[in-house]
Image: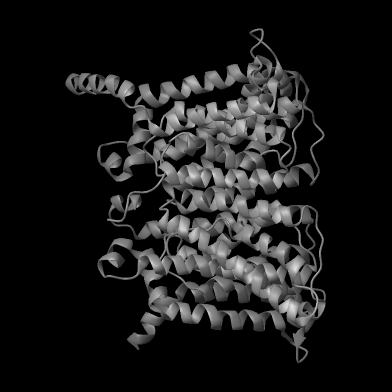
């Protein structure tokens, strides 16, 4: 019994995110003209998976009590790169995918190196590297264009057995291959521990630096997977500043909705994935209720503002006013 | 009491002479280097007209960076600059469309909108204890949403009233653009507030250690709230000036000011962790960024190259003197 209580305490944020998502999705499909059909689910999952990858990337960094304001720009950069490289014969395509993922890893590793070994503040450092990545994306694609291997794109965005969206399967595989090993490794625990209390983690001899570095690097990889998927959906590469910025912003919203603490050390990628799906569904609710699309940015902004304000409830638990000041 | 004051003064004066902050010196050295490079590239680079023109362009960034500096001194950050700038500009132009009274109140109204957004930021940071970069990103999104709804997704049609244009492009003193005078006034006010008032000392104290400042009797939450409101107001004022300069407001006019504003403050030696920094450094940072932009555009560097240069310059300068102390 008590085992269950600990499990519940650990997973509360994730379960809440799952609850919000399920509720929102029921409202969404109930009011959708087509109802709960495989196509609606496929479209929703394709849109949600993009944000889910970026939110996963953000989660890894947020767990270490950092923040990565360049995820959206890595996403754009890898999208533009993929629109050049992921074409042609299967061998060329495979080579392109590997290069795109490697570039994502490099971007993440650069962020990590600057933040951890350069000892700069994550906010400023990632804003600056974000500008560099955006500049590179713009060099690759001054105007939108390019193409992608459509066989691969279709294979990863279709649905299997008539109902199972391929994008969801990919998301699941990525979670299994990236998140599960990381969170169970020493480095994953070091990332959590350093987010929770860096001093305590240091004193216990955890490999904090390598743990954090790995977290930033994997964040770059996940953002690159997101960029690949964007290319698979749109068949083009585009360096749109506003789009990169809003993905960064939404990733933070998804992370918060997913029960990941922005102060670090608490939450999981699974929560962030449900947070991302919930956020996307909330945005799409406007369409099924026939609102003017003009209101969408405001609506998403207000949801974001409310989501981040939820953290203020922790203030009620504060017994000593000095705890206000962290 | 008098002892501590005189002690502080005696300590401050020689320190002011002695303290040649390496960051500020580096920033001014970089400005000189840029001027030399520029004059090699083009002979008209050192002409007074060109330099005054640069100073005029710098003044918009200067006003915005002033607010940003106040917030960074607290150890916080204001990422809502892009759409506060745009909101200030749009709302001022919108007010001007409502008859003579609107024209008269256009500038205060634009600034007021910025102050309101700043107040939301301040309440979130000071009273709800939400990390500043998160709440300011959120208010930025809300401000964007409000402006998109207001303009219907197109650039607003209202044009800037005469007063705004005069403020940005007119000449009160012959030869010196008004925008530069405005920046000088804003800067002088900020220097006075930071160095000569209890509010300014509190800002530095909070930036160093909010807990200690609170225990020594400062109402830290009120100070943080005011600082964010001032930052919002100054960003919006920067937007008003920009709208006067371009004679109309545009959707994304603020996007180009977030990174340069942070960069200018940080390059000027203000610690991103708060509690340390001088306004002189921010002035140097603003001029440095503006000259860099100007040279890159004279060299016809495309937007991509400019973004990369920015990012690299900021990271390199920060690595030179903006690093956190080594591990405990």
Image quarter of the C terminus of chain B: bottom left
Indicate whether B236 appears above or below B173: below
* Residue B286 coordinates in the image, percent (x, y): 55, 31
* Residue B243 coordinates in the image, percent (x, y): 71, 29
* Residue A110 coordinates in the image, percent (x, y): 52, 59
Indicate whether A287 appears above or below B286: below
Q: At 76% across and 58% down in the image, what residue appears?
A: A238
Can residue B184 be seen in this snapshot?
Answer: yes
Indicate whether B129 appears above or below A65: above
Give the color scheme: rainbow, by chain, secondary structure or one colour.
Answer: one colour
Query: In this view of the protein, which residue sits in the foreground, A73 or A40?
Result: A73
Horizontal placement of A145 versus B143: left or right?
A: right
Horizontal placement of A82 versus B65: left or right?
A: right
* Residue B241 coordinates in the image, percent (x, y): 66, 26
> To which quarter of the image does residue A49 belong?
bottom right
Horizontal placement of B95 versus B117: left or right?
A: right
User: How many numbered discs sit on the rendered protein?
Assistant: 0
Query: In this view of the protein, which residue sits in the foreground, B42 or B298?
Result: B42
Residue reaching furthest to the bottom: A161
Residue reaching furthest to the top: B174
Residue reaching furthest to the left: B3
Q: At 78% across and 73% down in the image, what residue appears?
A: A87
Query: In this view of the protein, which residue sits in the foreground, B215 or B307?
Result: B307
Can residue A278 be seen in this snapshot?
Answer: no
Horizontal placement of B112 versus B155: left or right?
A: left
> To which quarter of the image does residue A247 belong?
bottom right
Image quarter of the N terminus of chain B: top left
């Amino acid at each position: 019994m008590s085992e269950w209580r600990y499990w519940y305490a650990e997973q509360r944020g994730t379960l809440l995110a799952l609850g919000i998502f399920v509720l929102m999705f029921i409202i969404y499909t109930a009011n959708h003209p087509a109802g709960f059909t495989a196509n609606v689910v496929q479209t929703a999952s394709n849109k949600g998976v993009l944000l889910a990858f970026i939110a996963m990337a953000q989660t890894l960094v947020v767990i270490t009590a950092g923040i990565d304001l360049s995820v959206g720009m890595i996403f754009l950069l890898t999208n533009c790169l993929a629109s050049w490289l992921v074409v042609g014969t299967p061998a060329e395509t495979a080579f392109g995918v590997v290069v795109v993922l490697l570039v994502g890893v490099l971007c993440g590793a650069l962020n990590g190196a600057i933040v951890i070994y350069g000892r700069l503040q994550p906010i400023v450092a990632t804003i600056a590297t974000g500008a560099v990545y955006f500049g590179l994306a713009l060099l690759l694609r001054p105007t939108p264009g390019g193409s992608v291997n459509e066989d691969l794109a279709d294979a990863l965005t279709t649905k299997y057995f008539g109902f199972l969206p391929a994008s969801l399967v990919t998301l699941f595989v990525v979670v299994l291959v990236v998140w599960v090993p990381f969170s169970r490794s020493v480095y994953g625990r070091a990332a959590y521990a350093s987010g929770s209390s860096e001093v305590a983690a240091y004193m216990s001899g955890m490999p904090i630096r390598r743990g954090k570095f790995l977290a930033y690097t994997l964040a770059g990889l996940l953002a690159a997977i997101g960029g690949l998927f964007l290319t698979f959906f749109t068949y083009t590469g585009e360096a749109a500043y506003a789009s990169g910025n809003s993905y960064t912003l939404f990733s933070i919203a998804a992370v918060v909705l997913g029960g990941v603490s922005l102060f670090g050390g608490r939450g999981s990628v699974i929560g962030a994935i449900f947070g991302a799906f919930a956020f996307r569904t909330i945005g799409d609710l406007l369409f099924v209720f026939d609102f003017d699309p003009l209101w969408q940015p405001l609506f998403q902004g207000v949801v974001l503002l409310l989501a981040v304000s939820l953290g203020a409830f922790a203030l009620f638990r504060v017994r000593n006013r000095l705890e206000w000041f962290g | 009491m008098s002892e501590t004051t005189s002690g502080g003064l005696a300590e401050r004066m020689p320190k002011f002479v002695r303290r040649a902050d390496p960051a500020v010196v580096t920033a001014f050295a970089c400005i000189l280097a840029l001027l030399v490079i520029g004059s090699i590239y083009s002979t008209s680079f050192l002409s007074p007209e060109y330099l005054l023109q640069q100073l005029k362009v710098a003044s918009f960034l200067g006003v915005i960076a002033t607010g940003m500096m106040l917030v960074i001194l607290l150890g916080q950050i204001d990422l809502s600059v892009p759409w506060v700038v745009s909101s200030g500009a749009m709302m001022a132009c919108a007010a001007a469309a409502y008859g003579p009274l609107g024209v008269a109140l256009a500038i205060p109204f634009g600034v007021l909108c910025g102050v309101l957004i700043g107040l939301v930021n301040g309440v979130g940071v000071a009273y709800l204890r939400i990390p500043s970069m998160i709440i300011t990103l959120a208010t930025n999104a809300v401000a964007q949403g409000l402006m998109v709804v207001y303009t219907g997704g197109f650039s607003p049609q209202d044009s800037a009233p005469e007063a705004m244009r005069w403020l940005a492009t007119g000449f009160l003193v012959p030869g010196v653009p008004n925008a530069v005078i405005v920046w000088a006034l804003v800067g002088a006010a900020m220097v006075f507030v930071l160095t000569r008032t209890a509010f300014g000392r509190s800002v530095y104290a909070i930036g160093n250690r909010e807990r200690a400042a609170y225990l020594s009797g400062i109402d830290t939450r009120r100070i943080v709230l005011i600082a964010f409101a001032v930052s919002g107001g100054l960003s919006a004022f920067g937007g008003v000036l920009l709208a006067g300069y371009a004679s109309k407001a545009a959707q994304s006019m603020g996007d180009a000011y977030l990174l340069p504003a942070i960069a200018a403050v940080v390059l000027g030696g203000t610690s991103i962790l708060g509690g340390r920094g001088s306004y002189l450094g921010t002035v140097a940072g603003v001029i440095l960024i503006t000259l860099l932009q100007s040279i890159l555009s004279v060299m016809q560097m495309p937007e991509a190259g400019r973004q990369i240069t920015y990012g690299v310059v900021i990271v390199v300068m920060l690595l030179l003197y903006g690093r956190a102390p080594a591990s405990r």
